[in-house]
Image (cartoon, grey):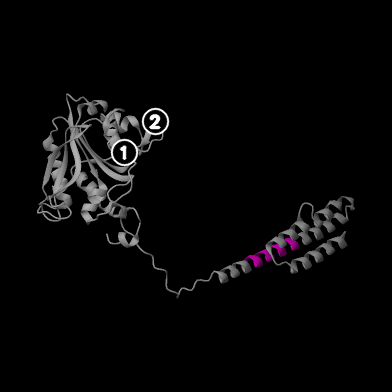
Amino acid sequence: MRQQLEEIRKNAEAALGEVSSLEELDAIRVKYLGKKGELTAVLKQMGGLSPEERPVVGQIANEVREYIQSEVDNKAAQLKSAAMDAQLLNETIDVTLPGEECEVGHRHPLSIVLDEVKEIFQGMGFDIISGPEVELDYYNFEALNIPKDHPARDTQDTFYITDNILLRTQTSPCQIRAMEERKPPLRVISPGRVYRSDAVDATHSPLFHQIEGLVVDEGITMSDLKGTLDTLAKKLYGPETKTRFRPHHFPFTEPSCEVDVSCFKCGGVGCSMCKGEGWVEILGAGMVHPKVLKNGGIDPEKYSGFAFGLGLERLVMFRFGLDDMRMLYENDVRFLEQF
């Protein structure tokens, strides 16, 4: 048995001397020290030894085990060190080479104007809210006094998911949701994407952005609406800007109006931007219809309110003198880096 142990030691020493990878090293460890290894097989035979031989053979076996284990550990450390050296050599970074320039981006023109509008309204005490883009027909139309047979639906044809679920055509559904979730006084704006099945051209897109505004409280009148929109116009286009209210019709407001601002390019004299009229239309607005207040869970006998809807793309085009909405969506860096 002593001879067997010495033979195991010599064979292990020879095998360890030829190892070139951690996988080969682990195979040698298992071969000699594993549960079914050669050293274990010899130790199982110790039961047949005399009491005098067992301590002697056991000591030799422990020495062989310790030797093999020590050599395995040393070899593993050497192989790991060599692998690390090779990796460092292959992944060497030449710190003297110039680094790659990282281009710093900036805000999109839509975001620039939207942030300005948000800041203006927050300064007047408005909260900013949001609503789902996949909306129920009830919130998008019916609760806003647009029943299923109303002709206003023809101008707001949209993308339907089911008969009662659609992509919202306006941010106005946020009015109803805000009235359901909050109690007056209410003062909120709701910016967001809206969808209509329009053909793409210089002034239309199936996807665009609106900014909805809503104020509800006791004693709200048309003069409050005019004062709010006058402040918005002056903050956006300068202190000399004037506003003009023209009668219009929206199913969810009564009375309703369209709002123009004096042309900020020519000062109202007349130019290509305002088509010689001196005025530029920027939004629609009006006093919230009593039915809409009632649908939102608010007593129209006690409360009144006003609402307005801004087209963000329209504001951006006016601000930067653009004549084609499509430029805002084409991601042309040459165009975007001008802002």
The location of residue 109, given as percent across then percent down, is 28, 54
Q: Check the image and report above or below for 165 versus 325.
A: above
Q: Which residue is the site of mark 1?
A: 169
Q: Is residue 309 above or below residue 9?
A: above
The residue under label 1 is which amino acid type? Answer: Thr
Most frequent secondary structure within the magenta stretch: helix
Mark closer to the chain start, 1 or 2: 2
**Image disc number at residue 163:** 2
Magenta-colored stretch includes residue 77: yes
Determine crowd level at label 1: few under 14, some 14-19, many 20+ residues with C-alpha closer than 10 A. Answer: many
Q: Is residue 276 left or right of residue 41?
A: left
Residue 209: % across, % down: 29, 45
Query: Neighbour class for label 2 at 10 Å: few (<14), some, many (≥20)?
Result: few
Residue 178 visible somewhere in the drawing: no
Residue 208: % across, % down: 31, 46
Q: Residue at x 38, y 33 (%)?
A: 165
Local SS, label 2: loop
Distance, label 1 to label 2, CA atoms, is 15 Å
Screen quadrant of the N terminus: bottom right
Q: Amino acid at mark 2?
A: Asp
Q: Which residues are magenta?
A: 67-80
- Disc 1 + disc 2, Cβ < 8 Å: no
Which dot marks residue 37? none
| Label 1: which secondary element | loop
Give 160 or 272, whichever is nearer the viewer: 272
